[in-house]
Amino acid sequence: MRISFLLHNAYGIGGTIRCTFNVAGALAAAGHDVEIVTLVRSGDTPSLPLHPQVRIVPLIELRRRVPGSDARNPLRSRPSRYVPEAEAGGTKNFNALTDERLAEYLAATDADAVIATRPGLVIALAESGSDRYLRIGQEHRLYTTHSAEIRAACDAAIGRLDAFTSVSEADAATHRAALPHVSTLLTAIPNAVPPTPIEPSDGRAKLVVAAGRLIPVKRYDLLVGAWAQVAARHPDWRLRIYGRGPQQPVLREKIDELGLADHITMMGAHSPIETEWAKGSIAAVTSREESFGMTIVEAMHCGVPVVATDCPHGPGEIITDGKDGLLVPVGDVDGIAAGLCRLIEDEELRRSMGEAARVSARRYSPEEIAARYEALFAELRERRAAAPAPAAAPARRRGRAADGRTPELSLKARLRARVVQLIRRPLRPVASCRVDPDGNLRVLVEADGLHGDELNLTITRRRHPEDRVTLPLRPPAGTGRSDRPEDAPPAWTAVLDRTRHTLAEGRWDLHVVRPSDGARRRVVCRYAEGRGLLLQRPLPGSPVHWWAPYPTVDGFLALRAWHRTAHAEATALRAEEEELTVEGTLYGFPATGGTPEVLAAGALTAVAVPRPARGKNAGAPPEPVTVPVIALGGDRFRFTVPYAPLHGAAVWDLTVRDVRRPAPDGPDPDPIRVGRFIGDIVDRNQTDLMPVLGGFRPYFTKASNLAISREARPS
């Protein structure tokens, strides 16, 4: 079949675009001729991955620099004839030009089925579509969430289509109840959510993960309130909330009011999110309503059981309560806390639920959803056969021969292709990485982007090109599937062994190098899996070194490294009006019987060191403030810094020191800073935020060191 999906803008990153790309790719892989018709084109290439056999057909060109751009077309300022203003956004989303281009396309297409993915496109398909092809509309939200004028226009349009799909059976039932007289087939086909090739959760990390837009309907305020109960019973567990949105400052304030700043981390947006789901042992969804629940299926694909409110409409259709997740009452803080604590306190239950969740999530794979669309097409054809209607001869798409085949390449084009084959192809390395059980970093570079017999992976410290580690890349033939994520493409493999390599403190970039011709290309990041870091500890002895992989803002794979003679890791902070209490773990100190000798001897003190002021009028800095350190057993410690003595300097850096060491004549050349970098988070100064209490704020610097600011957190 020739299948056409109508999207408003295929160059964005929304959930509708992702779902459409997923099912379009699966249909193309099943042998169908699939295209995505994007009403507008705003970018050079799609932001999301798309199956190579799926064509993108733009109708309106909005890139101003492109010849023939429609950016200044006067029809864009005129309102649409049939799309309501609430959906049209004035004339921003739909206008007279979109009416014209959609009508032209729908009159000329030779598709067998056209699928519209949002209300304005559904209305256009009903207005300008033809009986020559199946006309199918989709609802990616809920029937009740649209404004009255959009709802009325959609209801009228639905009756002129062959089928209309909702993403949940509950919403399909709502449509059937609201539109009892239409002959249109009203059915449910859920969103396609592909399984992930990353390593699934093993349920051991003491971490709960939530992710989504920070908007009122998601009710993250309930999750924060519930976590106050969870933290009281299980203070060693942590909650991470991923996402951005208008509720962020409200949630931040609530977290601080409840004293949960060191128990709940607001992580910001993260893509791809699958690596973060896999770090958790439990996922939490506390929405007031969900049209489907893509985040639920994403977490389940990663082997994470979900505690979700049993809200309309999706969670109850996705989760089998007590088997692959838990459903709790909507809006019930106590119920949410009880569900989370049940899985926290039963390790075997959450592991078995995680395994069952992976199995359950398979029914939402793109292949399964594509099969449901194929069944829908067959049913609609049978319906039409039972009530035949005259059909016009299909118009032919430009660029196709009379028999529907693509015209043969010209001799000139074939010669040009042959010349290109003779030129050595460039490197286009795309890689994923993961931390193995021994703490080593395994980098897997996809074979499709590599060409050559002997290749190396180099890891180079940023702004220090002389600092470089070169690792051989092992070709796929010797890799074996056990070295690769499940269902991942063949990959070249390099291993950064932490027992053999230490990296200087800083950020490191990865490149693939082909020695035969000197080609060198930076590595694009597919997945940076840090789950293995959550339960790792630094190797014993000194120096202390640690690294964490991450994707850069421009999409490349990089490492953040720390390298210290010794380190005092701040594992827990308790900020109060008059003091800060720090609990932590020592690394790199000589130990006897598993306990650092300095703790056993009672010789460790904590020192708050004033940071020198800058400028002409800066006076002599005040004296450091020293407080005792309490040994908690093994390598654990605790100390409390009162705020009252911290005057005369804006910032105080926290260190620990052996009182038996003679005081240095000048500044300590190698101070043992208190900080936080053990784990998977690269920039603690962006995530681990503490409130201002008593005019002081503890914070982590860009180097991950702990300091106290006298007022607001410094930039």
Image: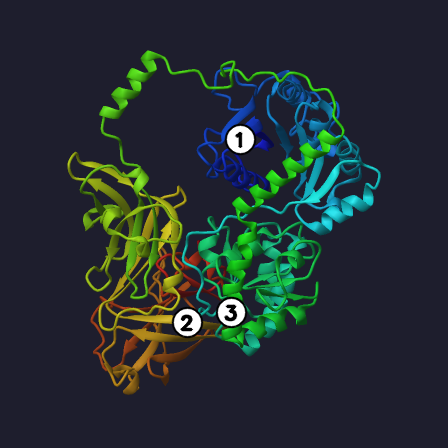
At 26% from the left and 86% from the top, the residue drawn is: 593
Q: If you read the primary sequence from the N terminus, does the residue marked by circle 3 or circle 1 appear first? A: 1
At 22% from the left and 73% from the top, the residue drawn is: 541
- Position of 638 relative to 432 (above/below): below
Would residue 238 be found to the left or right of residue 95 on screen? left
Please identify the residue farthest to the bottom as the structure is shown. 601
Q: Amino acid at mark 2?
A: Thr
Disc 3, disc 2: CB below 8 Å?
no
Element type at mark 1: strand
Q: Amino acid at mark 1?
A: Val
Locate residue 417: give its quadrant. top left
Q: Nearer the viewer, mark 3 or mark 2?
A: 3
Check disc 3: other Cα within 10 Å, few if <14, some if 14-19, many if 20+: some
Please identify the residue farthest to the right as the structure is shown. 181
Q: If you read the primary sequence from the N terminus, does the residue marked by circle 3 or circle 2 appear first? A: 3
Label 2 belongs to which residue?
571
Would residue 191 be found to the left or right of residue 165 on screen? left
Check disc 2: other Cα within 10 Å, few if <14, some if 14-19, many if 20+: some
The answer to whether residue 208 is visible is: no
Q: Amino acid at mark 3?
A: Ser
Check disc 1: other Cα within 10 Å, few if <14, some if 14-19, many if 20+: many
- Alpha-carbon span between mark 3 and mark 1: 39 Å
Where residue 595 sits: x, y (%)?
29, 83
Residue 34, numbered label: 1
Where residue 155 sits: x, y (%)?
78, 36
Label 3 belongs to which residue?
352
Element type at mark 3: helix
The total number of labels drawn is: 3
Question: Closer to the camera, 405 or 14?
Answer: 405
